[in-house]
Amino acid sequence: MLVMEALIEHDGMDMWALISARLALITGVLRRAFGCWHLKMSLPFTRGNETYRTCVSCGARRRFDLDQWAMVGAFYHPRRPAALYGRERQQI
């Protein structure tokens, strides 16, 4: 541990920044392995004929029934428009 502290002091790195970077790496690996738990959901949105809530963390959606005031069905990820995210882009 003393060697690590000496290296941190020598390089001028902040120890909390190093710990934070390690925790971010571990969190990323766990999220990829187990997925998002959708704990932070938005308020209901209505667009066209569809009412849904969106996960703030990952963007997944879940249908929302206004009569029962509850989420119904499985989570899904909306398809992205090809014009915005397609491989074909114009060079400026």
Image (cartoon, rainbow, N blue to C red):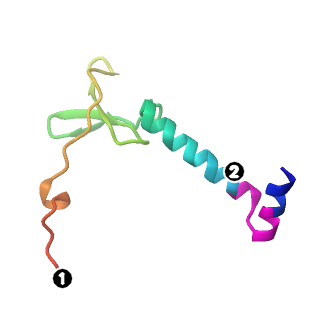
- Left or right: 90 in relation to 23: left
Answer above or below: position of 15 versus 54.
below
**Residue 24: horizontal and vertical position, in percent?**
57, 48
At horizontal 56% and vertical 47% (from top left) the residue drawn is 25
**Residue 61: horizontal and vertical position, in percent?**
30, 35
Binning the other alpha carbons within 10 Å of mark 2 as few (below 14), some (14 to 19) or many (20 upward) gives few
Give the numbered dot on residue 20.
none
Write down the residue under mark 2.
Answer: 19
- Left or right: 58 in relation to 21: left
Given the image, on which type of amino acid does mark 2 rest?
Answer: Ile
Q: To which quarter of the image does residue 82 belong?
A: bottom left
Answer above or below: position of 13 versus 52.
below
- For the magenta stretch, what is the residue range? 7-17
Q: CA distance from mark 2 to mark 1?
A: 42 Å
In the image, farthest residue toward the bottom: 92
Q: To which quarter of the image does residue 37 belong?
A: top left
Write down the residue under mark 1.
Answer: 92
At horizontal 69% and vertical 50% (from top left) the residue drawn is 19
Disc on the earlier residue, 2 or 1: 2
**Residue 41: horizontal and vertical position, in percent?**
42, 35
- Left or right: 90 in relation to 70: left
The mark tally for this picture is 2
In the image, farthest residue toward the top: 68
Answer above or below: position of 44 versus 4.
above
Q: Nearer the viewer, residue 76 or 62?
A: 76
Given the image, on which type of amino acid does mark 1 rest?
Answer: Ile
Question: Which quarter of the rendering shows the C terminus?
Answer: bottom left
Q: Secondary structure at mark 1?
A: loop
Binning the other alpha carbons within 10 Å of mark 1 as few (below 14), some (14 to 19) or many (20 upward) gives few
